[in-house]
Image (cartoon, grey):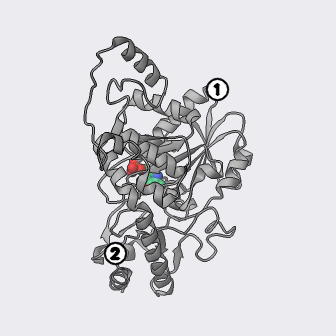
Amino acid sequence: MTHRPDTQAVHAGREDFVSLGVHASPIDLSSTYPVPDLDEGVASIDALAAGDATAANPIYARLYNPTVARYESALASLEGVDAAIAFASGMAAVTAILMAAKIKCPDKSNVVAVRPLYGGTDHLLASGLTGWDMKWATPETVSELVDEQTALVWVETPANPTLQLVDIAAVCKAAGDVAVVVDNTFATPILQNPAKLGASMVLHSGTKYLGGHGDVLSGLVACNEDWAAPIRQVRILTGAVLHPLGAFLLHRAMPTLPLRVRKAQENAIELVEFLDKHAAVSEVFYPGHGDNDPTGLVGTQMAGPGGILAFEVGSYKVAARVLAKVKVFTSAVSLGATDSLIQHPAGLTHRIVSEEARKGAGITDGLMRISVGIEDVADLIDDLSQALS
Ligand SMILES: *Cc1c(COP(=O)(O)O)cnc(C)c1O
């Protein structure tokens, strides 16, 4: 029986706990596993190397780890797909998708991607290192740019850092038979489930809301078995596995994911109202705010606007002064932790993106991005108020 998301967040991936006689996720730190039965070992290696999720014998920790597998099954159930594959970071997950597409689509040559994207993703795609020809699109030009050589369509919504929304169902329709990857890091599975709208792969930097406490680097791809198998094959080959301690922390954070996301969102809505009226702020970017969501995706595609916002203070100098003055907020990159973070995208997270791409995506020198935490919002408003004065 499929439970509601808040119940799934508490219970998913814990199905074997009673039979194991435990109440917390057991951490298996073995790097290798005994192989007393060689026939079973051979069959297990064959199965895991072909991309199977499990085998009779795990053989070696780069091939399989039970602590990681428990968290993977939990995330898959939250996203409503067959499987999830965990990586050492979000960028390792991005890389694995791009390599798995070489296995799945050996005769294709290009990837269509909608900007803006996370700075690292943009930089990797633009670098040519992955061997794909790039076609940069807007949501409107996806259908023109997709051709018989296209292996993947890549989108991020809400996008980093301008919170631009992309209509996932419309992009999936425009992509036709081509697999669509949606980076769901900002929304989390609590606010948005791209696979239910037609996406083939849902990407998460687990470093953000899924970890939720700023203490674990990780990446996840949630998808059905047709893509899960080649992605596991890539993980075995490249070795960018998630450490079981990281998987334990992610699993431990999962029951509170809905609470953290909703509290951050509540705070963000109040901060947007405060910033909107502030004389030093010329524009606020937030899903559903102003003319940011013309097609009404907040409330339909997304259950709510989320906990990330951006705003314009006019110049690099003013932004730098705000960062130097905040006391409750921490001036730092990353997002999705329990504490509020503020940063300057043009100077930090999107520094490695070409200036042209930055300008095209609206990432100005006066743009600041906030990841709202779960503090008392009155203290956040007081802090921003003194920093902006
Ligand atoms: C952080 C982030 C990534 C990359 O994840 P890492 O865990 O830092 O490697 C990818 N996409 C988005 C939207 C992100 O915020």
Left or right, 220 with reference to 298: left
Pick the quarter of the image with the C terminus: bottom left
Query: Compared with residue 309, is residue 376 higher up or lower down, i.e. above or below?
Result: below
Question: Label 2 crowding class (10 Å Cα cut-off): few <14, some 14-19, many 20+?
Answer: some
Q: Residue at image x 31%, y 51%?
A: 249
In the displayed structure, 136 sits above or below 230; it is below
Left or right, 243 with reference to 198: left
Location of mark 1 (residue): 107
Q: Nearer the viewer, residue 232 or 40?
A: 40
Q: Position of residue 191 (x, y in %)?
A: 53, 62
Residue at horizontal 46 percent and vertical 22 percent from the top: 47
Q: Quadrant of residue 237?
A: top left
Question: Can you identify the residue that label 2 sits on?
Answer: 375
Residue 98's spot in the image, x, y percent? 52, 37
Amino acid on which the number 1 mark rests in the picture: Asp
Query: Which of 38 and 246 lies nearest the eye of the viewer?
Result: 38
Task: Determine if residue 387 is in view.
Answer: yes
Would you say the residues marked 1 and 2 are in contact, meaning their CB atoms lie under 8 Å apart? no
Secondary structure type for disc 2 = loop
